[in-house]
Image (tube, rainbow, N blue to C red):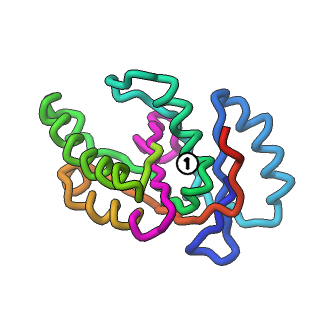
Amino acid sequence: MLYEDLNDPTGIGLLTFDEDPGYFLSTVRPLVGEAFSGLRFREEFTMLGRTYSMGYEADLEEALITRPKARLCSPELPWAVWYPLRRSGSFETLPENDKRAVLSEHGAIGHAFGKAGVAHDVRLACHGLSKDDNDFVIGLLGANLHPLSAVVQRMRKTRQTSTYLARLGPFFVGRARWQAPPA
């Protein structure tokens, strides 16, 4: 995807994905170096992650590959809000039942927006892949920007966000200028 950066009139965002991490070095790096050499690099918006399983998915290929690709390449979802986050250490010390309750509250909001068809997510784990030691990169995708902002607003009131996040953002907000065709 090539995004127009809503907060920077001369800015763009480039989102690439592949199952082989070598692709980012062998293919993306030379392309970016040549095609975008005149642009200012915004290091704070460099986000790298991998899809992951929650443990209850019936179809792992659908959850890890097919669904994220379909969402990213959907012309019906041109708006995006991308951001990294890091949980506080205290979340990791919670008993498993408490962790599930915290995550369930948070997930119910995302599920409601998804079921209504106004916001869809792409969640990436980035443990050990981020220079800032983030835990996740979240992409919220939709036909319109307002519901994506509303998801963030609603989630601010959850225990996960209000109590167990050490860091959230920066937020990249963009609209797709070009998307790869759906597979």
Label tally: 1
Q: Quadrant of residue 169?
A: bottom left
Image height check: is 72 above or below 35? above
Image point 44% across, 30% down: which residue? 52
**179 left or right of 97 in image:** right
Image point 84% across, 56% down: which residue? 35
Does the stretch in magenta take in 145? yes
The segment highlighted magenta reads 123-147
**157 left or right of 5 in image:** left
- The location of residue 76, given as percent across then percent down, is 56, 57
Image point 73% across, 33% down: which residue? 23
Reading the image, the residue beneath label 1 is 47
Does the stretch in magenta take in 110? no
Residue 167 visible in this rendered orientation of the protein: no
Q: Nearer the viewer, residue 17 or 71?
A: 71
Residue 117 visible in this rendered orientation of the protein: yes
Q: Nearer the viewer, residue 38 or 181?
A: 181
- The location of residue 182, given as percent across then percent down, is 66, 43
Image point 33% across, 23% down: which residue? 55
Q: Secondary structure at mark 1?
A: loop
Q: Residues within 10 Å of mark 1 (few under 14, many from 20)?
A: many
Residue closest to the far right? 34
